[in-house]
């Protein structure tokens, strides 16, 4: 009958949170770096059931030892290790596994020869994780190794001993052995390995065993015995401490070959091979959606634009005034950039002509309120988006007040919404609906992005703030007025080539994201750049010639939308100012100074005519 000491192989339990944390680190920190990264596992030494295999545990806390240590019970141990996360499944499959574990074992051997283990015995049992994270499918391929240096020992004596008391366990802790499970025994007391004397060929050691299989200590003991053999010890007494059935064995070394290495974990079927964790079926689908949405953005950050600030985009609150064609496409592009808070404003209902041009609606939505239906559709696309829809009629300059109570309430709601959001998109069908949001946005120093469509052209621009650039109305010499009354069918509908809206919407969103990357945001001038490129003022696209012009226009001192006099009058009078503008757009021309410009122009023309004389003189 053989008396050769046999060891219980070590297994692993890997919590799903470990792979979730790995996926975050892969995107945020590791990127394409496949070098070894330090990790930590835990295992228990005396809180085990009978015949239970020794096993380590990995979780999201494994990536920081400061997270691991507070989780310990008195019998817990931390096991330092490394993870090598490769970039492709082909690399995972083709990597030379024998060389991989041998290289790791050589590090252990060096630590033995250099006697580093006398100060840090845990260096004997560092583990390795080889992995590949398929972040698109949420599948994680991994293989754990416990590199073991070969030595063979004959059991020449075995007898039971008393259970290792908690008092002694605490004494081991006082030696700084939270990471260790081996120590010297001198005069029946645990001592640090640093007190090991090499003058004798015999030594007595203590081992906190993580195995409860009879006569089979954990493989964690093997490297320590190999180290003692390499140090010249031929006979070793090992006190194997367990919760139940502690015993002492006396061993004699009969073979020693540190170049023979084993330790790859076996599958549940007992075969050598990697494991697969498919989190797609375990994680909440909404959580999976969130990780997937962020995937493209994170890849963009670490592969193309490492300095891009994704958080400022994600945390921006965006208000869309208009929930039709432009509003639909703008919201989808915002989602693609990771924006989580999008609010719609519209007073219309979905019509039969809308679904083919407005991707947030379908045939069954006809007759529903646009803003509310758009918000619902956005949540169906991505459940974690915070989206609301407001049925709201924006007070329009040149359109007299007909229901003062309702229009004042709409005004107050509009002011409140603009105040609560960081960026406002003007996406309505008419010029006059854009006037009041322009005034309020300028007054509150908000980012305002304007997008407007023609048949085969479009305009995208950012409004200036505090006079640094012009707004949508700065090129006008008259105040906006009623453009909706007495219109024919083609004038009531937005007649435009279908692709124009997509071009305008995407450009508008990209302009916002670019502005958010600048420390001064919409205060930045047009000669400045961000990580995403130049900051423009206006884009005017012409699909007929497939041209896009970049233009810049200064703020007009008599602008009906952003001039200092208009902003001052609005801030002083509030809704009273709005009522006057709604009832008579000429009022705005007087306040802004446009009327005076007209009078001076008329006077100049009259003077020119007088100077030229009458027709009879010619």
Image (tube, rainbow, N blue to C red):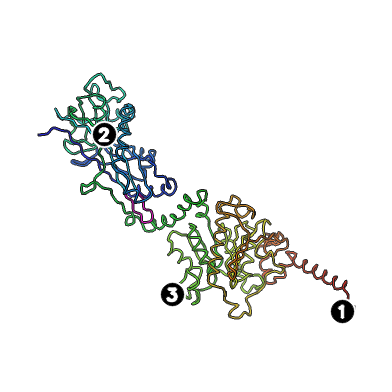
Question: Do the numbered discs 2 and 3 sit on residues whose CB atoms are within 8 Å?
Answer: no
Residue found at the very far top of the displayed protein: 199
Residue found at the very far left of the displayed protein: 1
Specify the label residue 364 is tagged with.
Answer: 3
In the rendered structure, which disc, 1 or 2, sits on the residue that comes first in sequence? 2
x, y percentage for residue 100? 31, 41
Mark 2 or mark 3: which is in front? Answer: 2
Residue 407: which quarter of the image? bottom right
Q: Secondary structure at mark 3?
A: helix
Residue ID at (43%, 47%): 31
Specify the label residue 259 is tagged with.
Answer: 2
Cα separation between marks 1 and 2: 114 Å
Q: Is residue 293 above or below residue 8?
A: below
Q: Secondary structure at mark 1?
A: helix
**Segment tinted magenta in the rendering:** 132-141
Decide: few, some or many residues near mark 2? Use Cα within 10 Å; few <14, some 14-19, many ≥20.
some
Q: Is residue 302 above or below residue 618?
A: above
In the rendered structure, which disc, 2 or 3, sits on the residue that comes first in sequence? 2
Q: Is residue 133 magenta?
A: yes
């Amino acid at each position: 009958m053989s008396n050769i000491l046999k060891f219980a192989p070590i297994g692993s339990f890997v919590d799903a949170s470990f792979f979730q944390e790995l996926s975050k680190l892969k995107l945020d920190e590791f990127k394409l770096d496949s070098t070894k990264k330090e990790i930590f596992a835990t295992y228990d030494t005396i809180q085990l059931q009978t015949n239970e295999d020794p096993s380590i545990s990995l979780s999201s806390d494994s990536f920081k030892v400061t997270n691991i240590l507070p989780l310990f019970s008195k019998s817990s141990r931390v096991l330092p290790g490394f993870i090598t996360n490769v970039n492709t499944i082909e690399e995972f499959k083709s990597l030379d596994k024998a060389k991989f574990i041998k290289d790791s074992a050589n590090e252990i051997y060096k630590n033995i020869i250099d006697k580093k283990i006398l100060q840090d015995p845990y260096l004997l049992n560092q583990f390795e994780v080889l992995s590949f994270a398929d972040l698109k499918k949420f599948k994680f391929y991994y293989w754990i190794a416990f590199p073991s240096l070969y030595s063979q020992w004959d059991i020449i004596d075995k007898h039971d001993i008393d259970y290792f008391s908690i008092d002694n366990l605490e004494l081991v802790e006082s030696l700084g052995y939270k990471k260790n499970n081996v120590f010297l025994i001198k005069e029946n007391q645990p001592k640090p390995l640093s007190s090991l004397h090499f003058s004798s060929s015999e030594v007595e050691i203590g081992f906190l065993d993580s195995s409860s299989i009879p006569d089979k200590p954990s493989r964690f003991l093997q490297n320590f015995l190999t180290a003692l053999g390499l140090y010249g010890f031929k006979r070793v007494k090992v006190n194997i401490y367990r919760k139940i059935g502690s015993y002492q064995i006396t061993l004699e070394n009969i073979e020693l070959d540190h170049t023979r290495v084993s330790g790859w974990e076996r599958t549940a079927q007992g075969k050598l091979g990697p494991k697969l964790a498919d989190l797609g079926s375990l994680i909440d689908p909404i959580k999976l959606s969130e990780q997937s949405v962020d995937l493209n953005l994170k890849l963009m950050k670490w592969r193309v634009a490492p300095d891009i600030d994704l958080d400022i985009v994600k945390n921006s609150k965006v208000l869309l005034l208009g929930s039709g064609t432009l509003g639909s496409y703008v919201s989808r592009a915002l989602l693609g950039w990771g924006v989580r808070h999008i609010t719609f404003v519209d007073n219309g209902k979905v019509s039969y002509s809308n679904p083919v041009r407005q991707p947030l609606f379908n045939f069954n939505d006809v007759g529903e309120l646009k803003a509310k239906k758009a918000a619902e559709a956005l949540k169906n696309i991505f459940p974690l988006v915070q989206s609301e829809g407001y049925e709201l009629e924006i007070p329009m300059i040149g359109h007299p007040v007909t229901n003062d109570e309702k229009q004042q309430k709409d005004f107050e709601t509009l002011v409140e919404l603009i105040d609560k959001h960081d960026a406002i998109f003007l996406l309505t069908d008419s010029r006059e609906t854009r006037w009041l949001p322009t005034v309020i946005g300028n007054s509150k120093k908000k980012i305002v992005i304007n997008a407007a469509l023609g048949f085969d052209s479009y305009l995208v621009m950012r409004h200036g703030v505090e006079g640094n650039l012009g707004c949508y109305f700065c090129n006008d010499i008259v105040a906006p007025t009623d453009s909706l009354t007495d219109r024919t069918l083609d004038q009531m509908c937005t007649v435009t080539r279908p692709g124009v809206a997509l071009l305008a919407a995407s450009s508008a969103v990209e302009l916002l994201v670019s502005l958010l990357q600048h420390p001064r945001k919409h205060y930045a001038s047009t000669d400045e750049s961000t990580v995403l490129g130049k900051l423009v003022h206006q884009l005017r696209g012409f699909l007929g010639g497939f041209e896009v012009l970049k233009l810049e226009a200064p703020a007009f001192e008599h602008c009906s939308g952003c001039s200092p006099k208009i902003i001052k009058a609005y801030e002083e009078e509030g809704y009273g100012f709005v009522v006057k503008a709604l009832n008579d757009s000429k009022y705005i021309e007087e306040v802004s100074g446009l009327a005076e410009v007209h009078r001076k122009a008329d006077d100049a023309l009259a003077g020119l005519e007088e100077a030229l004389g009458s027709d009879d003189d010619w």
